[in-house]
Amino acid sequence: MSRYIFVTGGVVSSVGKGITVASIGTILKSRQITVSVQKLDPYLNVDPGTMSPYQHGEVFVTQDGAETDLDLGNYERFIDINLGTESSVTSGQIYSTVIAKERRGDFLGGTIQVVPHVTTEIKERFNLLAEKTKAEVVIIEVGGTVGDIEGQPFLEAIRQMRNDVGRDNVLYVHVTLLPYLNSTQEIKTKPTQHSVNELRRIGIQPDIIICRSDHPISQEIRDKISLFCDVEKRAVIPMPTVPTIYEVPLVLEEEGLGQLIIDKLKLKPRSSDLKPWREMVNLIKTPREPVNIALVGKYVELKDAYFSVREALHHAALHHERDAELNWVPSETLENNGDDSVLRSAQGIIVPGGFGVRGIEGMVKAATYARENKIPYLGLCLGMHVMVIEFARHVLGSKKANSTEFDARTPHPVIDLLPDQRGKATKGGTMRLGNYPCQLVNGSHAATAYGQSLVNERHRHRYEFNNKYRKQLEAAGMVCSGLSPDGNLVEVCELADHPWMVASQFHPEFTSRPGRPNPLFRDFIGAAKDILREGAQPPLPLSSERYK
Ligand code: GLN
């Protein structure tokens, strides 16, 4: 039977609860303990698919096509597992299931209540994941902060679990913030005490408190939290802010969190091997020559909107012993003869995914720049649409070429809905989502990158490359280098007469891992790193030696 670790957050949001959960997973996995993870999101949306990236950051897509919170991306990257639909639970899903059951008459005339009906439905999701994955430990993150109205049913459900599956099989971890007061130069524990009180009020006594702080936490502070919050001294674990998120598992392991979990859950003691992880973190912290990448997108003000893209670029740069220096370019600033000086220092240009017409012309301009100046270009989903539109306009000379997403009346719809998609106007549930196989064309950049001919990558889009233009585009120098196995869908395209201009209909960023970058990202940085740009100098002889 699986054991459960429930992780709640206190004081404020964004203290790093998701990274803590991911790190606990890393620590357990380093002891050969199998883990799975679930995120409970208290909002009423059924999934984050229809939420603006400005509000919720990136929508992460699992291999089986669930649109989820970006925390799932961190779980996958840290623990190196592929999660599925069962790992993402929202209040919206829970309530719609309960109401559907009621409509079907499943409750035989009973009065439907939050306790027990909603909480039972929540607990069924815990069981579902445990049963499907058979993981020794299931880690469950409760989104939001203790005290939020929407989070109450989730907290009540996790409280009930201690009785349901036995006290030794459940662990409650509370992640809080210890604020620092500049005027008195001290760390305050009161907000943590309050949030633990709030938890206790609903019947949950935390076993472990993880304290995030920007300042060192003294033993005295730890003792105080232990006393007031009634947890063992060794179970008050500091989590200082560290230069890279990948260092968090090491910090927590150092503080004894791994052993503590083993003891509390009475798991078989196993030694931990975090050596490869430590080596990776050391490499991340070693100064490296930068490779300057311009990320031209629509939501760049909020970096979380491109979380996986940013991580994938870092993984790829690390592979080449470089540091990805990202220039976040709001695509609108490139429009209408806008200043493109930012592109002049870029060794590579990346156009990530996105929806809607705003900023598209700026992205097209970035693609023109990359094509004409032979700057490596990686297009991700929308970035592929942009590349095809650009090529059709400026190489084929079809000036009004566009995607029907942006111009429904374009005379040259090089990107369009598939015929059977037309008429399905609603936003929810009409996208191509999750893994699809893709056959790569021998000798192409894409095939060289992957080193294999059949790959599976994750999708999230509605519009597709329009086959009516395939012949024309190919004759002009575009290579359709990745196709669906039946040959009908263009999944990757690239330019013949260019050092490295490649774009995929799928999102390769979702499968990138630290230590195992996605091949397209890896080769994109590989091509970009040797490009010399305005104001740049060739690497010093010393370092060129090192980076050979
Ligand atoms: N907006 C485009 C589509 O729906 C691209 C989506 C994306 O980039 N994820 O097809």
Image: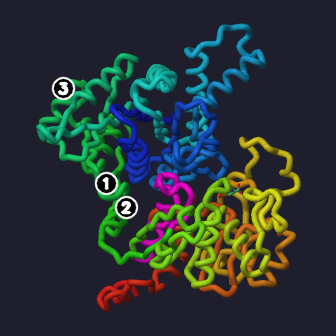
Q: Is residue 152 magenta?
A: no
Q: Is mark 1 within 8 Å of ligand 1?
A: no
Q: CA distance from mark 1 to mark 3?
A: 26 Å
Q: Is residue 498 above or below residue 335?
A: below
Residue that label 3 marks: 227
Placement of 113 over or under 494, stated as above or below: above
Q: Nearer the viewer, residue 162 or 324?
A: 324
Relative to 533, is 195 on the left or the right? left
Using the numbered discs, state the Cα–Cα distance from disc 3 to disc 2 in whole angstroms: 34 Å
Residue 410 visible here: yes
Q: Kindly check if marks 2 and 1 are in contact, taking CB atoms under 8 A apart as contact.
A: yes
Q: Main secondary structure of the magenta part?
A: helix
Q: Quadrant for residue 52, please give it.
A: top right
> Of 510 and 76, which appears nearest the observer?
510
* N-terminal-most mark, 3 or 2: 3
Residue at point 60% right, 13% down? 113
Q: Which residue is mark 1?
A: 250
Counting labels gives 3
Q: Is residue 303 magenta?
A: yes
- Check disc 2 and report the residue beneath it: 277
